[in-house]
Image (spheres, rainbow, N blue to C red):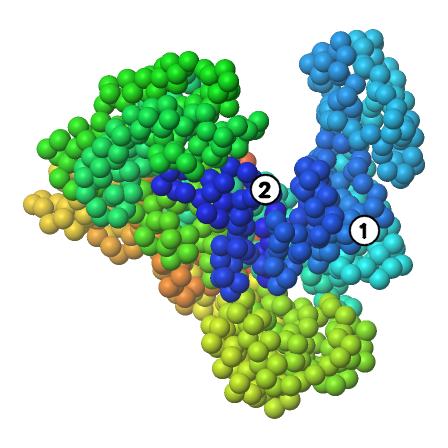
Amino acid sequence: MRFYVPEWDDAVDAHYDFEHDELSTLDRQERDLDYIWDIFEPETTPIDGVLISREQVEETDRKAERLAEYGVYDDPVLSVPNWLPTISDCGAWGYKSLPFPPYGNEEMLSFYETLDVTVGVTIDHLVLGSGKEEGRLYLDERAFEGELSRSDIPDAIEDVVDVMTDEWPAEWPDYVDEYEPTIRTGPDAGVEPFTAEDFQGDIDSVLARLAEDSRSVYREDDAQFRYELTLRNAQEMYDLYQQRDYPFRLMVAIQGWDPDSYADAAADVLDIGYDYLGIGGVAGSPIHDVRTIVKSVGKTVKAFEREHNTRVDSHVFGFAKTDGFETIGRSGMTSFDSASMLRSAWTGGQNYRLDHDERYDAIRVRYPSSRDDLETAVETALRSRETLVALRAYDAGDSIRAALEDWSALAADVLPAAERYLREHRHDEQFDHRLLEEVESAFRADFEYGRELQVSFSDDLRGDLVKLLRKDDPADPLPFEKYGSLLNTAAEVFERFSRATSTLDDADAVSDYDRIWAIVREYATWVGDDNLLEEYQETLRERPWETCDCPICHEYGIEVCIFRGNDRNRRRGFHNTRRFYDEFEDDLPKILVATKGTASLGGYDTVEDYLRNEHPGFWSQTHDLPVAELGVLDANGVNEWWEDAPAMVSFAPDRMAANVAEQAARYQQLFIQTEDGTLSDELVTAARENDCEVMAYSDPPELRQQVLKICGENYAVGEDFLPEPPEIETGDLDILVIDQCSGSKDFPDDAPVFDADQTLQYSREDLLARDNVPGIAARDLYTGRQQTYVRDAVRRLRSNGHDVERYFISAGFGLVAEDDYLPPYEVTFSSMNVGEIRERSASLHIREDLRRVLNESDYDIVFFTLGKDYYTSIDIDEMVQEVRADRIGVVFNRELVEDQFDNIASVPARTEDAKRHGTIVVGLKGLYMENFAKYVEDVEMICPQTIEQLCRYVEDGPNQMTLSRDRP
């Protein structure tokens, strides 16, 4: 599986001066830029490809012209390395407010060919929904440049119609004639401004009038139109693609609004003939929506692959959540893209990432604002410079006080030196330039303290001095007082500003951490970031940059944990991407599966044709494998399954070993099928030198099983790794019950009772050791209605030969086993808000302990008989993912969870259900457990649906369910 990063000009200055916060050169065209693929070595680059949208390419004329001339691989700026594949699309998010995509199919094919990308994507139109009650109305923004503005549209229209305004292209593609000929005006045609009369009258009249207007498009069902237009483009683009020998692969983009519509679209485009399918429109969607959509499309694709003995690659656009790795992996997705890990470095909090759970806030050290006067700018620069000096000393283990004193002495020399320099050199020829940038570059290079002046006393001060230098004509010199006034203002601020060294005199500042915290706390409070103090404390205390071995953290240290400007923030984004990629590789191993080719490879048009015909056993066992990449091996390395077969075939051992080793550097596992199950020592050694484990097999079914085993337990389940409801025989079940504590407890009246603070402050062992404190087994302590029902169900199950383990989520003591002894206490989650529940749960380590139990217990079914607040304490949406795919998890009133995972049953347990069973909601989940214990003996196989039927069964009552002795 491959991870692509979108190209959004995410580059840094390769020679940035961190000490002085200065770019290497002020002229961007002369600057040496580093992209993420320049920062890392090829084998450690945390991406597998680059996504390049037309919208981004055409962001500036210069970039568009450059890429059109050189292509993405030879472009002197972008310079994507040849080993990184590229996908290019039209950028549907960029034109989502337009009534039509602004490009034509043939035009896009030509664009992809010009850019020389690996994969081009069909034109899709983002499905946004059908609009409000009356649909969706599109308006040309250019028509609001007259007396009427967008805000003047009557509320009566906006209340019933979804109004979308955007600047329309000067000329629409030809296909638009078929849908809206009125808007197909010439490229030089003017746009007449809207007037108030255009929107007056009843709604139907206004919409009917605008439907014929060249400045508007109206649709009653916009979702269906976008969906069908996307499919039409897929067909037309495929037909055009087949007519020419384009050098890129064509991917089809599909859209939809729910799992079924996406699955239907997938089926349609597969019938057209596509072998690379992209799921669009899910960027920014909740994880549960993405799971259900990807799962639905994945099943459609796998069914097609198996029916037609072919392989189909799949891509998820705009998605990168570690929570979804399991779903996209088992659903057979081949690739995905996202910039979220990169963007997270400068958006929101917790912007320095070590892994999914361990994140920190980079410390904001701010630049002066463009709105600041000179005094404020200078003071802000001084305080920021001082904080940076202290942070670097803390990182290096140097004396913070000495570092601050050295800087203060240096800063004291800067302004007097600037005055002397300007008096002597202000009329030098080097400052005789028209462009400020050239004057500033000369001043920065020639003046000894040119860089220190900017970082300590602000870019505003240096910029104002440079403006004077440009105006200062030797023939008509400026009064030097103009320079002196600026320098004197800065000197006065420097003289009176409070030095950070004064905070180090505090008697409590006895360690380096104490000292840096005192300085950062004072600075953050001064700039108004005091709401981040707790987060900053954690960052400084934990020093996370020291635990990361990526080249960015290794080279720049604490600079990566400082929030300040593009060249720090984007580097932190590259670091975040590296750490995300580490998790990606852990959850979805990089696997390459190949068979050794033969001389007949060159006689086929495609590698797929060759594999299907010459290696049918290998192909039948591998063509539907998830996660892995697939191909055939010759001296050129691995030819991927979808490629054209090579014209010249060679099997020279040395070349084969060298090329395979180069490709293996990007993988963790290499599985090769050969006739005798052996490989040359040279090839094995070369691959392993690049940290890739090589395994050879002669038997394709064995190879398949080993690949699935490497992918993880869930992939090796049964005959099919796809997510599907498990079926379990009911004889001798292993059952795990995760119950909750209750407000009703049974303990002696004269026993001491401990409260929420005490149960956090002391362990239960400490409390039980006190005088007169009885120890009561958890199963006997909790006497609520639900707990009584569950206790009886457990007894019945055990008496019938089933093995049952029962645990309780205790708001007082965390996760406890039923036979653990507890002291009397009065604490429940029901009296807390969500934040308090999560905080207390973290203190009690409930999630970690429950995750350990789920991973270590051997169970067939796990019941989470918990209420809403207790579900919050364990983060049930996350916890159900710990339930193995071949096991069943049972939750209550969590239909959204059930929709995402085939092995999870959500049983309704609301007021109407309680009435139907003649009880109250408080005890219903326990009653369901009793039902399950009673009726499970009547069936031989169970799946999630069966469990729901057993729990909700009512004898001789309405809606009675029939129990099958075989399966539901």
The answer to which of marks 2 and 1 sits earlier in the sequence is 2
> What amino acid type is highlighted by mark number 2?
Gln
- What residue is shown at x 24% (from left), y 19% (from top)? 496
Name the side, left or right, on which 28 lies relative to 268.
Answer: left
Q: Which residue in the structure is indicated by mark 2?
A: 29
In the rendered image of this protein, does residue 813 appear above or below residue 267?
Answer: above
Name the side, left or right, on which 554 lies relative to 663.
Answer: left
Quadrant containing the C terminus in the rendered view: bottom right
In the rendered image of this protein, does residue 431 appear above or below residue 885?
Answer: above
- What residue is shown at x 64% (from left), y 89% (from top)? 675
Few, some or many residues within 10 Å of mark 1 (<14, 14–19, 20+)? many
- What residue is shown at x 53% (from left), y 33% (from top)? 438
Rendered image quadrant of residue 696: bottom right
Name the side, left or right, on which 51 lies relative to 554.
Answer: right
Few, some or many residues within 10 Å of mark 2 (<14, 14–19, 20+)? few
The x and y percentages for residue 953 are 55, 50
- What residue is shown at x 48% (from left), y 35% (from top)? 441
Report the front residue among 131 and 79.
79
The x and y percentages for residue 65 are 73, 43
Q: Is residue 328 visible?
A: no
Report the front residue among 435 and 796.
435
The image's mark for residue 109 is 1
Name the side, left or right, on which 454 lies relative to 596.
Answer: left
Rendered image quadrant of residue 478: top left
Report the front residue among 435 and 369.
435
In the rendered image of this protein, does residue 688 appear above or below residue 482?
Answer: below
> What amino acid type is highlighted by mark number 1?
Leu
